[in-house]
Each structure stands twice: as structure tokens, then as C-alpha cells.
């Protein structure tokens, strides 16, 4: 047996490989920070107040109300307009219309492009305090919602329905006692409106009604005096999408090539693959599946499930990566426990899989349902909001606890190595120098593993905050100023996983180098053949992939 590449590679070649990987990691961060724009773009829309002049607004669900273009709706500037009073118009006849993207002065009407990938809409209400119409505590807002689209070349009024639903949102508004005078606005939290996982058409339209006829559960009762509705539309930046897809397209074939090279070396060995080699293969395959840029298909087809699919692929990769780190550290604990089986790690793996299953259920409860109803939101009710907060907080705590556990396992590995290292002074000089080199290399790799694990935990927390900041009522203007840093972190973290897995596949591949043997005499007078030029061979246990493991477990023989 010739051990792994990590143990047998010359210092010069190992240095070249290390520098190359660090440069590749720097390139990923520079691409994200200097080339890729902010991951998301934000459009702030003010709803136009259209008047449905039909005899019964609730029976005209097929009619679209749009603010721009030929045949646009009859509008009013305010809801206390004399036209509304004179014509006895009620809330059933008011349609809040939002057509996007917003027009820009001096240019043709802009359009949405497929590079935007997805749309998320949140709603803000301007509600004025009136003594004769006060707001009750946490009133229910009943919404009749329609989402439509049209493409370039369609007539201005040729809108097609994409989704239609009746939804309920719980309002959370407050107003200090000192400002409780007529005309002051309540401070209301943002409300989730919709999330759609595709941007396949050029123009979109939202019609919002707040009906009062035929509603139940006191919906739209005691909500105060509504003045305006604002909708914030968030979508992926097209420039970021291009950089993201291009990066995945370049990385995928490189990783496939190193996986094939690694497994061919493993299969050439006279022994069956050990657990660590199988886990490395599985990790590489899952990362390739996560890398394959099938998102290119969204430029030709409308695939609203792509967001959910991306979450599932990334979740599977994370779960296997977390399991791999546990096994990677466990296989190097170097104690008397037989660990070359998954059963030996069932407690740790069960905890990891349970946490990942909880996140999968949370994702399916929201994005899974949104495949049928984009207006659904788990954040719409107090119960759903509490559950969502609980899932995210528990997931963050579990991620931190996992990292602490991994640090403890690595500490035990280092402690065992330090304890066993006491047998080195009694060895011949070449053998001692060889094992000391292996120990230094292995410790460096374990520290890199801890760094990668720490950044992965940070990435998980940052991604959850970046995705949910609008749900938690954060200031969007402040977030936008930080998004360029998020781009560098996203692309850098993605590159880190690929560089790390690439390095493991290279360094833990079986080494096929053999050198001219040299005879070294141990202290007990027995001869032993040891290869020169850093290719020293020792007898190893059949289930061990590393000569360092064999050294620690067989100190009695040394």
C-alpha cells in the first residue's frame, strides 16, 4: 500500500497545489465582489386606485384593471375623492392596481427579463388615524388577489391570469399616544404578498381588492382609514444570474473529471473502498448534482419549481457535507473503536438528518404550497409566523451546536495525535521525519476543515437573514447597501465548497508512487524496507486509508 497523495506528495508539489487552490478561492471572491452585482434588485410600486364601475364588482373577476396603456382604468387620486362620494362607490368597487416594471423617463417602457429568475412581493399599507374610525388590535385583512402577465407584442389590455386567490393577512400596527391625532399614519409591519419562482414574461399586473360584501370572520373590519398600498417587488439581479450560471458551468466539468480520476485510483487498489472513500465519492457526486446548471432551461421554459428544486439540491449537499465532516473527524480519532461503518456514527448522523428534515418540511410548507398558490405565505398568520421563527432559530442554534461538536472532535483528534507522538523520538530519523511531516499536513487540513465548516454555518445564517429580512421588517435601503458584500460571500462560499471537495479528492486519493527501497535498521535490530524520496511504505491495516491512522493504531509495532 502506498497511502494517500497527502502523505506521499513532495513538499514542492504540495505547495504548488495549495497555492493553486488558494488562488482559485481568491478568484471566486473577486468574481463575487468585483464582477457580480448585488444578488437582488428592488422595485417600489405605489398602487393605482382604479374604480370598477360595473354593477357588481365581485362578479367581474375576469376584468383586468391596469394603470398604463390603451384602455387603462378609471382612477382616483385619493379614497376621499368627491367622485367616490357622489357616485356611491364602496370598497367593493375599488381595485388597487400595480403594473410593473415601473416606467422610466426618456426611455421605452422597460420589461422584466428571464434572467430575473423569481419574484417576491411584500405589501405596506398607509393607514391614517381617525378618531371616528380607529383601528382594532391586530385586525384581519381580507384580500382578493390576481396576478396577470402579458408579453411584448400583446395588446395593452391582453392580460392573462397567472394566479388568483383569496387570502387573509393579520395586520400588526401601532401608534404612540402622542401621535393619535387625525391624519397621522400608523406604523404597520410589512405583509407578505406573493412569491413566484419564475420570470418568464415581460410585464406583470397585480389587482388587489379589499371586499366588504360576503366576507366572514370580521375581515376588513376595524382596519382604520386606508390611504395607499405600496408593494415592494424583489427579484434576482440579471447580472448576478449570468455570473452565477457561468461559474457553475465552468466548475461542473472540472469537478466531474477529478471525481472520475479519484474513483479510478480507488478501484485499482487490491482492497475494497473504505467508508471515508465512499463518503468522498458521495460528497463529490452530490456537489456535482448541485453544480449542474439546469437553471439555463429557465431562459426557454417557465419552471416555477426551480426555486424549490435548488433548495432541495443545496439541502442534500449540506446534509451530506455535515455527515462527511463527522465521519472525517471520527475516522481520524485513532482509538480502539472500529469506525469503518456508518452504524458507528448513527447518533451523530441521525441528529444531522433530523435537522435537515425539519428544514425540508419548512421549505415544503411554504415554497411547496406556493407552486399552486403564489399568494400563500406561512408568515400570514401568528401561528405560521411563530412556527417559521421557531424553525429558523432552532436551525441556527443546531448549526452552532454542530460546529461546537465538530470542534470538540477535532480537538480529540489533535490530543490523540499529540499523545501518540511521544513514540516518534525512538524511531529512526527518516521514519520520524516522515511521520512528523504527515502530522503537520494532516493538522493543517483539519484546520482548513474547521474554517470551511465555520464559513458554511455563517453562510447558512446570512442566507436565512438575507432571504427573510423583508419578512422581519428590516430597512430595505440599508440592506441594499450591503448586498454587494453578500454577492462576494455567496460566490466565495460556493467556490469554497468546490475548492475544498476538489482538494480532498486530490489529497485523499490513493498514491501510486513507488520509490527505490532503502533498508533502515530499527533499535531492536530488525531490518525494514522504507522507500526514499518521501515515499516510505509501512504495513497498514486493510480498512485504513491513511498511514497516519496505521501509525497511531499500531504504536506497539513501532
Image (cartoon, grey):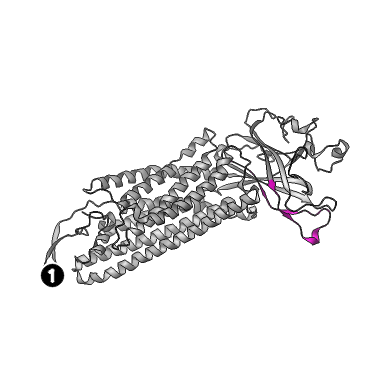
Residue 72 visible: no
- Check the image and report above or below for 140 versus 531: above
Q: Nearer the viewer, residue 134 or 99?
A: 134
Q: Which residue is mark 1?
A: 524
* Image quadrant where one finds the C terminus: bottom left
The structure residue drawn at horizontal position 48% and vertical position 57%, both measured from the top left corner, is 457
Report the side of 224 relative to 150 (left or right): right
Q: Is residue 190 magenta?
A: yes
Q: Nearer the viewer, residue 89 or 28?
A: 89
The structure residue drawn at horizontal position 83% and vertical position 57%, both measured from the top left corner, is 181
What is the x, y in percent for residue 180?
81, 58
Give the mark count. 1
Report the side of 34 relative to 348 (left or right): right
Q: Residue 542 occupies which quadrant of the picture?
A: bottom left
Where are the magenta residues, as a range?
Answer: 169-197
Q: Residue 554 occupies which quadrant of the picture?
A: bottom left
Amino acid at each position: 500500500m502506498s497511502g494517500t497523495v497527502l502523505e506521499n506528495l513532495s513538499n514542492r508539489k504540495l505547495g504548488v497545489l495549495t497555492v493553486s487552490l488558494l488562488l482559485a478561492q481568491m478568484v471566486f471572491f473577486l468574481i463575487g465582489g468585483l464582477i457580480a452585482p448585488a444578488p437582488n434588485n428592488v422595485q417600489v410600486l405605489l398602487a393605482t386606485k382604479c374604480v370598477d364601475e360595473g354593477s357588481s364588482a365581485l362578479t367581474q373577476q375576469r376584468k383586468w384593471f391596469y394603470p398604463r396603456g390603451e384602455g387603462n382604468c378609471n382612477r382616483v387620486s385619493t379614497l376621499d375623492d368627491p367622485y367616490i362620494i357622489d357616485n356611491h362607490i364602496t370598497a367593493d368597487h375599488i381595485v388597487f392596481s400595480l403594473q410593473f416594471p415601473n416606467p422610466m423617463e426618456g426611455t421605452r417602457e422597460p420589461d422584466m427579463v428571464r434572467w430575473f429568475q423569481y419574484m417576491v412581493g411584500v405589501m405596506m399599507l398607509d393607514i391614517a388615524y381617525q378618531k371616528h374610525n380607529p383601528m382594532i388590535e391586530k385586525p384581519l385583512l381580507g384580500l382578493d388577489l390576481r396576478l396577470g402577465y402579458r408579453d411584448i407584442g400583446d395588446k395593452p389590455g391582453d392580460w392573462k391570469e397567472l394566479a388568483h386567490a383569496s387570502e387573509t393577512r393579520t395586520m400588526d400596527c401601532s401608534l404612540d399616544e402622542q401621535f393619535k391625532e387625525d391624519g397621522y399614519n400608523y406604523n404597520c409591519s410589512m405583509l407578505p404578498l406573493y412569491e413566484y419562482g419564475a420570470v418568464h414574461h415581460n410585464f406583470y399586473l397585480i389587482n388587489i381588492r379589499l371586499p366588504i360584501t360576503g366576507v366572514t370572520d370580521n375581515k376588513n373590519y376595524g382596519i382604520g382609514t386606508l390611504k395607499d398600498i405600496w408593494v415592494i417587488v424583489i427579484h434576482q439581479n440579471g447580472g448576478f444570474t449570468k455570473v452565477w450560471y457561468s461559474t457553475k458551468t465552468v466548475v461542473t466539468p472540472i469537478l466531474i473529471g477529478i471525481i472520475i480520476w479519484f474513483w479510478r485510483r480507488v478501484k485499482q487498489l487490491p482492497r475494497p473502498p473504505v467508508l471515508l472513500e465512499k463518503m468522498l465519492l458521495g460528497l463529490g457526486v452530490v456537489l456535482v448534482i448541485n453544480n449542474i446548471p439546469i437553471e439555463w432551461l429557465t431562459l426557454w421554459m417557465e419552471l416555477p419549481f426551480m426555486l424549490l428544486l435548488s433548495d432541495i439540491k443545496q439541502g442534500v449537499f449540506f446534509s451530506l457535507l455535515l455527515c462527511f465532516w463527522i465521519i472525517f473527524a471520527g475516522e481520524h480519532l485513532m482509538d480502539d473503536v472500529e469506525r469503518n461503518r456508518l452504524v458507528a456514527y448513527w447518533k451523530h448522523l441521525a441528529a444531522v438528518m433530523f435537522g435537515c428534515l425539519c428544514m425540508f418540511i419548512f421549505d415544503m410548507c411554504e415554497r411547496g404550497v406556493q407552486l399552486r398558490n403564489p399568494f400563500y405565505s406561512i408568515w400570514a398568520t401568528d401561528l405560521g409566523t411563530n412556527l417559521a421563527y421557531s424553525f429558523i432559530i432552532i436551525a441556527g442554534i443546531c448549526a452552532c451546536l454542530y460546529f461546537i461538536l465538530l470542534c470538540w472532535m477535532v480537538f480529540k483528534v489533535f490530543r490523540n495525535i499529540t499523545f501518540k507522538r511521544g513514540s516518534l523520538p525512538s524511531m529512526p530519523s527518516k521514519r520520524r521525519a516522515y511521520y512528523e511531516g504527515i502530522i503537520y499536513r494532516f493538522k493543517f487540513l483539519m484546520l482548513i476543515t474547521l474554517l470551511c465548516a465555520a464559513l458554511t454555518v455563517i453562510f447558512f445564517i446570512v442566507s436565512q437573514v438575507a432571504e427573510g429580512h423583508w419578512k422581519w421588517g428590516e430597512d430595505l435601503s440599508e440592506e441594499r447597501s450591503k448586498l454587494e458584500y453578500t454577492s462576494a460571500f455567496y460566490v466565495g462560499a460556493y467556490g469554497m465548497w468546490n475548492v475544498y471537495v476538489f482538494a480532498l479528492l486530490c489529497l485523499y486519493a490513493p498514491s501510486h508512487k513507488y520509490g527505490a527501497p532503502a533498508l533502515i535498521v530499527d533499535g531492536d535490530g530488525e531490518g525494514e524496507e522504507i522507500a526514499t524520496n518521501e515515499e516510505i511504505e509501512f504495513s497498514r491495516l486493510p480498512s485504513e486509508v491513511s498511514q497516519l491512522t496505521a501509525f497511531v493504531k499500531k504504536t506497539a509495532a513501532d
